[in-house]
Amino acid sequence: MARKPVIKPRKIATQERSRATVDTLIEATARILVKEGFDKASTNRIAEVAGVSIGSLYQYFPGKEALVAAVIERHQQQIMQTVRSGLMRVSTQPLEQAMRTFVAIAVEAHRHDPHLHRVLAEQIPRVGKLEKLEIFSRENFSLFRAYLEGTRDELGVDDLELASFVCVTTIEALTHNAVLHHSKVLTGDRIEALIDEGARLVTGYLKG
């Protein structure tokens, strides 16, 4: 039976100097993942790139899986900051405009360090199931559901729980694949066209 990776840090850095060490280790892990891949991201390599002793690394992290998990958590926090700030303007928008905003926000979120985003999307299954990622998904779902509740009279669907799942999953899959796997062809006006088409897709579904 395969060993379940340990993804929790050994301890939380509280002092400024120790937080700086942890930040340096996480940043070094991210750089290695992008440039060299998961398999090359050994604890020795991470410590070397970070300029930190291997003993200091193990003081905070039990292994590379925990460091990758920390990179994922930080990346998701940065994405959610983009999502939350963008969604502040959605609540007062009509349905068509709001759906366009949702899709545009998803595109912007996926374009945040896309090289790292791609690597993490590939490596998450190897690190293990992460509760933080589930919370991230639930928060997106809740934000979307809250908007639908306020515009129920405009909708042609009755099950808002299911509708939120369908729309969030569709927007996520569309923008994820577009930004991470077709970025070379999606430039300039094509990005705006993608946002328009994605918004038209989910708006049509919601109107029934």
Image (cartoon, rainbow, N blue to C red):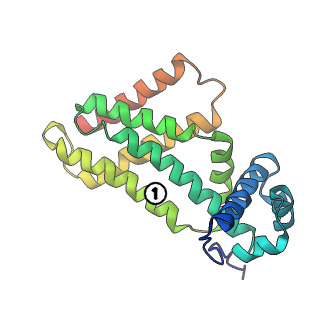
Q: Considering only vertical position in the picture, is 180 above or below 3?
A: above
Q: Residue at x 29, y 28 (%)?
A: 97
Residue 139 is left or right of residue 175, and the answer is: left
In the rendered image of this protein, does residue 131 appear above or below residue 172?
below
The residue labelled by disc 1 is 136
Relative image position of residue 119 (x, y in whole percent): 69, 49
Judge from the rendering whether residue 58 lies leftward or rightward of residue 139; answer left or right.
right
Give the camera-side residue of 142 and 205: 142
Instruction: Give residue 127's position: percent from left, percent from top.
Output: 67, 66
Q: Quadrant of the N terminus?
A: bottom right
Report helix, strand or loop for mark 1: helix
Q: Position of residue 115 (x, y in %)?
A: 68, 41
Taking the view exactly as shown, the residue that stands out farthest to the bottom is: 1
Which quadrant of the rendered structure holds the C terminus?
Answer: top left
User: Does 172 sit left or right of 39 as displayed?
Assistant: left
Q: Could you tell me if residue 111 is visible in this image?
A: yes
Residue at the extreme front of the image, as rendered: 16
> Badge 1: few (under 14), some or many (20 or more) residues near its Cα, within 10 Å?
some
Q: Is any part of residue 163 visible from this angle?
A: no
| Residue 121 horizontal/vertical position (percent) | 62, 52
Q: Which residue is drawn at 87% across and 60% down?
A: 48
The front one of 50 and 76 is: 50
Left/right placement of residue 60 relative to residue 163 reads right
Q: In this rendering, is residue 198 above or below 9?
A: above
**In the image, what residue occupies the spot 82% across and 75% down?**
55
Count of numbered labels shown in the rendering: 1
Q: Quadrant of residue 66?
A: bottom right
Q: Which residue lies furthest to the top in this view?
A: 189
The disc labelled 1 sits on which kind of residue?
Phe
